[in-house]
Amino acid sequence: MAYVITEPCIDVKDGACTLACPADCIYEGGRMFYIHPGECINCGLCLSICPVDAIHYDQELPEAARRFETINRDFFGPEVSGLGDPGGWDRSVSVPVDHPEVAAVAKPEQQPA
């Protein structure tokens, strides 16, 4: 069991969760952060600090966000980032890729300056 980052994180990437996480199990992709399910210690600090309410306990995921449990897990596999089990995040482990479902989400329109 682990916490899961969901759609509200896409294109926001506030990063407060990475600073709060004592297990360093939150990794940065191109458009959002992902929680490594095998490294998460279920402490809930990330949940309490996320400014966009993007983090949920896997057993309490809203039905519409259920797919993000698989998205977070698959992000670490060879088909997506290839990170595997890195053993702790720091900026050197950030990757510019995202899970294909995240990459397919339409980007918000740019506001004119």
Image: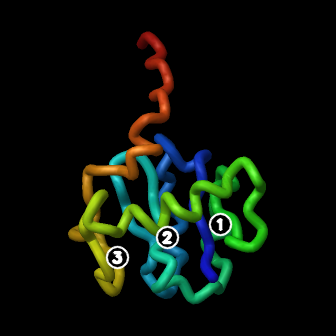
Amino acid under disc 3? Trp
Question: Which circle's residue, 1 or 3, is located before the other in the chain?
Answer: 1
- For this orientation, the residue located farthest to the front is 79
Callout 3: SS: loop
Label 2: how many residues lie within 10 Å, few (<14), some (14-19) or many (20+)?
many
Residue type marked 2? Ile
Coloring scheme used: rainbow
Residue at 43% x, 35% y is 104
What residue lies at 60% left-to-right and 55% top-to-bottom? 67
Q: Which residue is mark 2?
A: 35
Q: Give the total number of marks visible in the rendering.
A: 3
Q: Is 36 positioned to the left or the right of 82 in the image? A: right
Instruction: Residue 88: give x, y in percent of width and height.
Output: 35, 83
**Quarter occupied by residue 50:** bottom right
Classify 48 as above or below 86.
above
Task: Tell me: residue 7, above or below residue 75.
Answer: above
- Position in image of residue 34 (x %, y %): 46, 63
Mark 3 residue crowding within 10 angstroms, few (<14) / some (14–19) / many (20+): some
Spatial CA span between label 2 and label 3: 10 Å
Q: Which residue is mark 1?
A: 49
Mark 3, residue position: 89
Across and down, in percent, residue 79 comes to: 28, 59
The alpha-carbon separation of the residues under discs 1 and 2 comes to: 15 Å
Q: Is residue 71 above or below residue 111?
A: below
Q: Position of residue 41 (x, y in %)?
A: 57, 89
Mark 2: secondary structure: strand
